[in-house]
Image (cartoon, grey):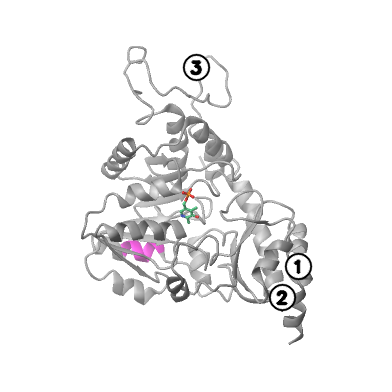
Amino acid sequence: MRFDTKLVHEGQRTRPGAGDVVPPIHVSVTFDQFAQDPARYYYARGESPTREDLEACLAALEDVRFAAVFSSGQAAASAVLSLLEPGSRVIASDDVYGGTYALFELCRRRGVDVRQVDLSDVDAAAAALSGEVDLVWVETPTNPLMKIADIAAISAAAHRAGAVVVVDNTFASPALQQPLAAGADVSLHSTTKFIAGHSDVLGGALVLDDPALHRRLVDHRTVVGGVPGALDCYLVHRGLKTLSLRVARQVANARAVVEVLTASPFVGAVHYPGLPGHPQFELAARQMSAPGSMVGFEYLGDVRELLRRMELFAPAVSLGGVRSLIEVPASMSHRPVPAEVRARAGIADNLVRLSFGIEDPVDLVEDLSAAMAAAPHVERIGAR
Ligand SMILES: *Cc1c(COP(=O)(O)O)cnc(C)c1O
Protein backbone atom coordinates (compact mmCIF):
# COMPACT_ATOMS: atom_id res chain seq x y z
CA MET A 1 0.00 0.00 0.00
CA ARG A 2 1.09 3.53 -0.68
CA PHE A 3 1.13 6.28 1.95
CA ASP A 4 -2.29 7.83 1.29
CA THR A 5 -3.95 4.41 1.21
CA LYS A 6 -2.28 3.43 4.50
CA LEU A 7 -3.72 6.58 6.11
CA VAL A 8 -7.20 5.22 5.47
CA HIS A 9 -6.70 1.45 5.69
CA GLU A 10 -4.04 0.67 8.32
CA GLY A 11 -5.13 -0.20 11.86
CA GLN A 12 -8.78 -0.67 10.87
CA ARG A 13 -9.65 -3.87 12.76
CA THR A 14 -13.40 -4.30 12.60
CA ARG A 15 -15.50 -6.69 14.67
CA PRO A 16 -16.24 -9.89 12.77
CA GLY A 17 -19.87 -10.07 11.67
CA ALA A 18 -20.68 -6.44 12.53
CA GLY A 19 -20.18 -4.94 9.08
CA ASP A 20 -18.33 -1.90 10.46
CA VAL A 21 -16.35 0.19 7.99
CA VAL A 22 -14.84 2.01 10.97
CA PRO A 23 -13.38 0.07 13.94
CA PRO A 24 -15.31 0.16 17.22
CA ILE A 25 -13.92 2.22 20.11
CA HIS A 26 -12.91 -0.12 22.95
CA VAL A 27 -13.54 1.81 26.14
CA SER A 28 -13.06 -1.14 28.51
CA VAL A 29 -10.12 -0.64 30.88
CA THR A 30 -10.05 -4.23 32.07
CA PHE A 31 -10.48 -7.43 30.12
CA ASP A 32 -12.05 -10.81 30.89
CA GLN A 33 -9.12 -13.21 31.12
CA PHE A 34 -11.17 -16.29 30.21
CA ALA A 35 -13.03 -14.79 27.24
CA GLN A 36 -9.79 -14.37 25.22
CA ASP A 37 -7.82 -17.16 23.65
CA PRO A 38 -4.95 -16.49 23.94
CA ALA A 39 -5.33 -13.73 26.56
CA ARG A 40 -3.85 -10.61 25.00
CA TYR A 41 -5.48 -7.73 26.90
CA TYR A 42 -5.20 -7.40 30.65
CA TYR A 43 -5.50 -3.78 31.82
CA ALA A 44 -5.70 -0.66 29.62
CA ARG A 45 -2.71 1.15 31.15
CA GLY A 46 -0.70 -1.64 29.53
CA GLU A 47 -2.61 -2.61 26.39
CA SER A 48 -5.80 -1.50 24.68
CA PRO A 49 -7.24 -2.44 21.26
CA THR A 50 -8.14 1.11 20.16
CA ARG A 51 -4.66 2.35 21.06
CA GLU A 52 -3.09 -0.53 19.13
CA ASP A 53 -5.09 0.32 16.02
CA LEU A 54 -3.68 3.85 16.00
CA GLU A 55 -0.18 2.51 16.66
CA ALA A 56 -0.46 0.06 13.75
CA CYS A 57 -1.28 2.92 11.41
CA LEU A 58 1.50 5.21 12.67
CA ALA A 59 4.11 2.44 12.38
CA ALA A 60 2.98 1.60 8.83
CA LEU A 61 3.23 5.25 7.76
CA GLU A 62 6.97 5.21 8.50
CA ASP A 63 7.45 1.62 7.27
CA VAL A 64 8.54 0.18 10.62
CA ARG A 65 7.21 -2.39 13.09
CA PHE A 66 6.41 -0.34 16.17
CA ALA A 67 4.71 2.79 17.46
CA ALA A 68 3.86 3.69 21.02
CA VAL A 69 1.33 6.45 21.60
CA PHE A 70 1.19 8.66 24.69
CA SER A 71 -1.18 11.10 26.35
CA SER A 72 0.79 14.05 24.86
CA GLY A 73 3.93 14.81 22.89
CA GLN A 74 5.60 15.76 26.16
CA ALA A 75 4.80 12.34 27.66
CA ALA A 76 6.37 10.69 24.59
CA ALA A 77 9.47 12.89 24.83
CA SER A 78 9.80 12.28 28.53
CA ALA A 79 9.64 8.49 27.98
CA VAL A 80 12.68 8.76 25.69
CA LEU A 81 14.56 10.99 28.12
CA SER A 82 13.77 8.62 31.01
CA LEU A 83 16.20 6.15 29.40
CA LEU A 84 19.09 8.43 30.34
CA GLU A 85 21.18 7.87 33.49
CA PRO A 86 23.02 10.61 35.37
CA GLY A 87 26.22 11.28 33.42
CA SER A 88 24.64 10.41 30.05
CA ARG A 89 25.60 12.74 27.22
CA VAL A 90 22.98 14.29 24.95
CA ILE A 91 23.55 16.47 21.90
CA ALA A 92 20.44 18.40 20.88
CA SER A 93 19.35 21.11 18.46
CA ASP A 94 19.75 24.62 19.90
CA ASP A 95 16.39 25.83 18.61
CA VAL A 96 13.87 23.37 20.08
CA TYR A 97 10.22 23.39 21.13
CA GLY A 98 9.86 25.29 24.44
CA GLY A 99 8.51 22.22 26.25
CA THR A 100 11.47 20.15 25.02
CA TYR A 101 13.80 22.78 26.46
CA ALA A 102 11.95 22.48 29.79
CA LEU A 103 12.41 18.67 29.70
CA PHE A 104 16.14 19.16 29.00
CA GLU A 105 16.31 21.37 32.10
CA LEU A 106 14.79 18.53 34.17
CA CYS A 107 17.42 16.16 32.72
CA ARG A 108 20.21 18.59 33.56
CA ARG A 109 18.95 18.77 37.14
CA ARG A 110 19.30 15.01 37.47
CA GLY A 111 22.86 15.05 36.16
CA VAL A 112 22.40 14.41 32.45
CA ASP A 113 24.79 16.43 30.29
CA VAL A 114 22.59 18.04 27.59
CA ARG A 115 24.52 20.17 25.08
CA GLN A 116 22.52 22.20 22.58
CA VAL A 117 24.24 23.05 19.31
CA ASP A 118 23.13 24.36 15.94
CA LEU A 119 22.69 21.03 14.14
CA SER A 120 21.91 22.82 10.87
CA ASP A 121 25.58 23.90 10.94
CA VAL A 122 27.38 20.88 9.44
CA ASP A 123 30.74 21.66 11.11
CA ALA A 124 29.20 22.35 14.53
CA ALA A 125 27.23 19.09 14.31
CA ALA A 126 30.33 17.08 13.31
CA ALA A 127 32.39 18.57 16.16
CA ALA A 128 29.65 17.88 18.72
CA LEU A 129 29.35 14.25 17.56
CA SER A 130 33.08 13.50 17.54
CA GLY A 131 33.18 12.23 21.17
CA GLU A 132 31.06 9.66 22.98
CA VAL A 133 27.35 10.49 22.92
CA ASP A 134 24.35 8.52 24.22
CA LEU A 135 21.45 10.36 22.60
CA VAL A 136 21.11 12.84 19.75
CA TRP A 137 17.91 14.90 19.69
CA VAL A 138 17.20 16.46 16.32
CA GLU A 139 14.35 18.83 15.67
CA THR A 140 13.96 19.64 11.98
CA PRO A 141 12.53 21.95 10.81
CA THR A 142 13.30 23.78 14.05
CA ASN A 143 10.83 25.80 15.98
CA PRO A 144 10.44 28.71 15.34
CA LEU A 145 13.34 29.52 12.97
CA MET A 146 12.74 26.68 10.46
CA LYS A 147 16.38 25.63 10.34
CA ILE A 148 16.93 22.26 8.69
CA ALA A 149 19.32 19.58 9.97
CA ASP A 150 20.60 16.78 7.73
CA ILE A 151 19.02 13.67 9.31
CA ALA A 152 21.05 11.16 7.25
CA ALA A 153 24.42 12.81 7.92
CA ILE A 154 23.72 13.36 11.62
CA SER A 155 22.41 9.81 12.07
CA ALA A 156 25.54 8.33 10.49
CA ALA A 157 27.83 10.44 12.70
CA ALA A 158 25.71 9.77 15.79
CA HIS A 159 25.81 6.01 15.23
CA ARG A 160 29.62 6.16 14.95
CA ALA A 161 29.56 7.92 18.35
CA GLY A 162 27.34 5.15 19.77
CA ALA A 163 24.22 7.29 20.12
CA VAL A 164 20.51 6.70 19.62
CA VAL A 165 19.01 9.31 17.28
CA VAL A 166 15.59 10.80 17.97
CA VAL A 167 14.00 13.15 15.45
CA ASP A 168 11.12 15.34 16.56
CA ASN A 169 9.10 15.04 13.36
CA THR A 170 6.14 17.11 14.58
CA PHE A 171 6.63 20.09 12.22
CA ALA A 172 6.95 18.00 9.06
CA SER A 173 4.67 15.05 9.89
CA PRO A 174 5.24 11.67 8.20
CA ALA A 175 3.52 13.08 5.10
CA LEU A 176 6.53 15.31 4.36
CA GLN A 177 9.49 13.71 6.13
CA GLN A 178 10.56 10.14 6.94
CA PRO A 179 13.39 10.29 9.51
CA LEU A 180 13.60 6.52 10.04
CA ALA A 181 14.21 5.90 6.33
CA ALA A 182 17.01 8.47 6.56
CA GLY A 183 18.70 6.52 9.37
CA ALA A 184 17.25 7.88 12.62
CA ASP A 185 16.18 5.43 15.36
CA VAL A 186 13.05 7.08 16.73
CA SER A 187 10.56 9.44 15.09
CA LEU A 188 8.71 11.50 17.69
CA HIS A 189 5.41 13.24 17.09
CA SER A 190 3.19 15.50 19.02
CA THR A 191 0.10 13.96 17.40
CA THR A 192 -1.75 16.98 18.81
CA LYS A 193 -0.50 18.88 15.74
CA PHE A 194 -0.66 17.73 12.10
CA ILE A 195 -1.44 14.06 12.79
CA ALA A 196 -4.73 14.67 14.63
CA GLY A 197 -5.01 17.99 12.82
CA HIS A 198 -8.08 19.62 14.38
CA SER A 199 -6.75 21.22 17.60
CA ASP A 200 -9.18 19.13 19.66
CA VAL A 201 -7.09 16.30 21.13
CA LEU A 202 -3.66 15.95 22.80
CA GLY A 203 -1.37 13.05 21.99
CA GLY A 204 2.17 11.91 21.33
CA ALA A 205 3.85 9.05 19.53
CA LEU A 206 7.21 7.32 19.24
CA VAL A 207 7.71 5.37 16.01
CA LEU A 208 10.63 2.95 15.75
CA ASP A 209 11.85 -0.42 14.47
CA ASP A 210 13.99 -1.70 17.39
CA PRO A 211 12.02 -4.32 19.40
CA ALA A 212 14.16 -3.98 22.55
CA LEU A 213 13.90 -0.20 22.62
CA HIS A 214 10.17 -0.42 21.91
CA ARG A 215 9.77 -2.82 24.88
CA ARG A 216 11.64 -0.46 27.23
CA LEU A 217 9.56 2.53 26.16
CA VAL A 218 6.25 0.68 26.47
CA ASP A 219 7.21 -0.75 29.87
CA HIS A 220 8.04 2.77 31.00
CA ARG A 221 4.70 4.00 29.70
CA THR A 222 2.81 1.26 31.54
CA VAL A 223 4.51 2.05 34.84
CA VAL A 224 4.33 5.86 34.60
CA GLY A 225 0.84 5.80 33.10
CA GLY A 226 1.06 8.49 30.39
CA VAL A 227 -1.39 6.63 28.16
CA PRO A 228 -4.08 8.22 25.98
CA GLY A 229 -7.67 7.09 26.48
CA ALA A 230 -9.59 5.17 23.82
CA LEU A 231 -11.69 8.17 22.77
CA ASP A 232 -8.56 10.30 22.30
CA CYS A 233 -6.91 7.54 20.25
CA TYR A 234 -10.01 7.34 18.09
CA LEU A 235 -9.98 11.11 17.49
CA VAL A 236 -6.28 11.09 16.55
CA HIS A 237 -6.84 8.16 14.19
CA ARG A 238 -9.91 9.79 12.64
CA GLY A 239 -7.98 13.00 11.99
CA LEU A 240 -5.00 11.10 10.61
CA LYS A 241 -6.99 9.77 7.65
CA THR A 242 -7.01 13.21 5.99
CA LEU A 243 -3.36 14.05 6.75
CA SER A 244 -2.18 14.19 3.15
CA LEU A 245 -5.13 16.29 1.97
CA ARG A 246 -4.75 18.75 4.84
CA VAL A 247 -0.98 19.05 4.53
CA ALA A 248 -1.15 19.69 0.77
CA ARG A 249 -3.55 22.62 1.32
CA GLN A 250 -1.57 23.89 4.30
CA VAL A 251 1.64 23.98 2.25
CA ALA A 252 -0.14 25.77 -0.62
CA ASN A 253 -1.49 28.35 1.86
CA ALA A 254 1.96 28.87 3.37
CA ARG A 255 3.49 29.42 -0.07
CA ALA A 256 0.81 31.99 -0.99
CA VAL A 257 1.33 34.01 2.19
CA VAL A 258 5.14 33.76 2.06
CA GLU A 259 5.02 35.42 -1.35
CA VAL A 260 3.17 38.38 0.20
CA LEU A 261 5.47 38.52 3.24
CA THR A 262 8.69 38.63 1.21
CA ALA A 263 7.31 41.58 -0.81
CA SER A 264 6.02 43.54 2.22
CA PRO A 265 7.81 46.69 3.45
CA PHE A 266 6.59 45.86 6.97
CA VAL A 267 8.44 42.55 7.16
CA GLY A 268 12.11 41.80 7.84
CA ALA A 269 13.53 38.28 7.63
CA VAL A 270 11.15 35.52 6.50
CA HIS A 271 12.02 32.00 7.68
CA TYR A 272 10.62 29.36 5.34
CA PRO A 273 12.57 26.39 3.93
CA GLY A 274 10.76 26.76 0.60
CA LEU A 275 12.44 30.12 -0.11
CA PRO A 276 15.53 29.88 -2.34
CA GLY A 277 17.30 32.27 0.06
CA HIS A 278 16.80 29.91 3.04
CA PRO A 279 20.25 28.67 4.19
CA GLN A 280 19.25 25.00 3.86
CA PHE A 281 16.92 25.35 0.86
CA GLU A 282 18.58 22.50 -1.06
CA LEU A 283 18.75 20.17 1.93
CA ALA A 284 15.06 20.80 2.64
CA ALA A 285 14.19 19.99 -0.97
CA ARG A 286 16.14 16.72 -0.69
CA GLN A 287 14.93 15.68 2.77
CA MET A 288 11.30 16.76 2.69
CA SER A 289 8.70 16.21 0.00
CA ALA A 290 7.50 19.82 0.54
CA PRO A 291 8.77 22.69 2.75
CA GLY A 292 5.92 22.47 5.25
CA SER A 293 3.42 25.03 6.42
CA MET A 294 5.16 26.69 9.36
CA VAL A 295 6.51 30.18 8.71
CA GLY A 296 8.44 32.61 10.89
CA PHE A 297 8.89 36.29 10.06
CA GLU A 298 10.12 39.47 11.71
CA TYR A 299 7.39 42.06 11.85
CA LEU A 300 8.69 45.63 11.81
CA GLY A 301 5.74 47.05 13.75
CA ASP A 302 4.02 46.34 17.05
CA VAL A 303 3.52 42.57 17.14
CA ARG A 304 0.77 42.67 19.77
CA GLU A 305 -1.20 45.13 17.64
CA LEU A 306 -0.77 42.86 14.63
CA LEU A 307 -2.14 39.86 16.52
CA ARG A 308 -5.09 41.88 17.78
CA ARG A 309 -6.01 42.91 14.23
CA MET A 310 -6.10 39.43 12.73
CA GLU A 311 -9.61 38.19 11.90
CA LEU A 312 -8.97 34.65 10.63
CA PHE A 313 -5.63 33.70 12.20
CA ALA A 314 -6.33 32.98 15.87
CA PRO A 315 -3.69 34.45 18.21
CA ALA A 316 -2.84 31.12 19.79
CA VAL A 317 0.02 28.68 20.30
CA SER A 318 0.11 25.17 18.83
CA LEU A 319 0.05 24.31 15.14
CA GLY A 320 -0.97 21.90 12.44
CA GLY A 321 -4.74 22.25 12.80
CA VAL A 322 -7.33 23.10 10.17
CA ARG A 323 -7.59 26.67 11.45
CA SER A 324 -4.72 29.11 10.89
CA LEU A 325 -2.91 30.43 13.97
CA ILE A 326 -0.51 33.28 14.69
CA GLU A 327 1.78 33.61 17.69
CA VAL A 328 4.85 35.42 19.03
CA PRO A 329 7.37 32.81 20.25
CA ALA A 330 9.27 35.17 22.60
CA SER A 331 6.17 35.89 24.67
CA MET A 332 4.11 32.75 23.98
CA SER A 333 5.45 29.32 22.90
CA HIS A 334 9.06 30.02 23.90
CA ARG A 335 8.41 31.89 27.14
CA PRO A 336 9.91 28.95 29.14
CA VAL A 337 13.21 29.53 27.32
CA PRO A 338 15.37 32.14 29.14
CA ALA A 339 15.77 35.45 27.24
CA GLU A 340 19.55 35.03 26.79
CA VAL A 341 19.09 31.52 25.34
CA ARG A 342 16.44 32.87 22.95
CA ALA A 343 18.74 35.72 21.93
CA ARG A 344 21.64 33.31 21.28
CA ALA A 345 19.35 31.12 19.14
CA GLY A 346 18.21 34.20 17.17
CA ILE A 347 14.59 34.29 18.37
CA ALA A 348 13.87 38.02 18.29
CA ASP A 349 11.03 39.63 20.26
CA ASN A 350 9.35 40.67 16.99
CA LEU A 351 9.48 37.18 15.47
CA VAL A 352 5.99 36.04 14.51
CA ARG A 353 5.11 32.41 13.79
CA LEU A 354 2.28 31.36 11.51
CA SER A 355 0.66 27.92 11.40
CA PHE A 356 -1.44 27.47 8.28
CA GLY A 357 -4.85 25.86 8.28
CA ILE A 358 -6.90 24.70 5.31
CA GLU A 359 -8.86 27.92 4.62
CA ASP A 360 -8.89 29.57 1.18
CA PRO A 361 -5.45 31.14 0.53
CA VAL A 362 -6.99 34.38 -0.78
CA ASP A 363 -8.78 34.97 2.53
CA LEU A 364 -5.59 34.32 4.48
CA VAL A 365 -3.54 36.69 2.31
CA GLU A 366 -6.22 39.37 2.67
CA ASP A 367 -6.42 38.91 6.44
CA LEU A 368 -2.69 39.26 6.99
CA SER A 369 -2.24 42.10 4.47
CA ALA A 370 -5.12 44.07 5.99
CA ALA A 371 -3.87 43.58 9.56
CA MET A 372 -0.33 44.66 8.66
CA ALA A 373 -1.52 47.72 6.71
CA ALA A 374 -4.21 48.79 9.21
CA ALA A 375 -1.93 49.06 12.23
CA PRO A 376 -1.25 52.84 12.62
CA HIS A 377 2.42 52.38 13.46
CA VAL A 378 2.96 50.64 10.14
CA GLU A 379 2.57 53.84 8.14
CA ARG A 380 5.53 55.32 9.99
CA ILE A 381 7.70 52.34 9.15
CA GLY A 382 6.56 52.41 5.53
CA ALA A 383 7.45 56.08 5.26
CA ARG A 384 10.97 55.93 6.61
C1 LIG B 1 3.70 20.62 20.57
C2 LIG B 1 5.06 20.07 20.38
C3 LIG B 1 5.59 19.15 21.29
C4 LIG B 1 4.85 18.73 22.55
O1 LIG B 1 3.66 18.09 22.28
P1 LIG B 1 2.33 18.17 23.21
O2 LIG B 1 1.39 17.29 22.48
O3 LIG B 1 1.91 19.60 23.29
O4 LIG B 1 2.72 17.63 24.55
C5 LIG B 1 6.85 18.65 21.03
N1 LIG B 1 7.56 19.04 19.95
C6 LIG B 1 7.08 19.93 19.06
C7 LIG B 1 7.91 20.33 17.88
C8 LIG B 1 5.81 20.48 19.25
O5 LIG B 1 5.35 21.38 18.37
- Mark 2 vs mark 1, CA separation in Å: 9 Å
Q: Residue at x 44, y 40 (%)?
A: 71
In which quadrant of the rendered view does residue 89 lie? Answer: bottom left
Q: Kindly identify which residue carries mark 3.
A: 16
Mark 3 or mark 1, earlier in chain: 3
Q: Residue at x 30, y 40 (%)?
A: 220
* Residue type beneath disc 2: Ser
Q: Residue at x 68, y 58 (%)?
A: 253
Percent position of residue 249, x then y: 66, 53
* Residue type beneath disc 1: Ser
Task: Give the overall secondary structure of the magenta segment.
Answer: helix
Mark 2 or mark 3, earlier in chain: 3
Q: Which of marks 2 and 3 is in front?
A: 2
Secondary structure under badge 1? helix
In which quadrant of the rendered view does residue 365 lie? Answer: bottom right
Above/below status of 229 relative to 361: above
Q: Which mark is residue 19?
A: none
Secondary structure under badge 2? loop
Above/below status of 217 relative to 229: below
Q: Kindly identify which residue carries mark 2.
A: 264
**Magenta extent:** 151-156
Q: Which of 67 and 32 is in front in this view?
A: 32
Q: How crowded is mark 2: few (under 14 residues within 10 Å), some or many (20 or more)?
A: some
Q: Kindly identify which residue carries mark 1.
A: 369
- Mark 3 vs mark 1, CA separation in Å: 54 Å
Percent position of residue 185, x then y: 34, 52
* Residue type beneath disc 3: Pro
Q: Residues within 10 Å of mark 1 (few under 14, many from 20)?
A: some
Percent position of residue 107, x then y: 30, 57
Taking the image as shown, residue 130 lies to the left or right of residue 340, namely left
Ligand 1 within 8 angstroms of badge 3 C-beta: no
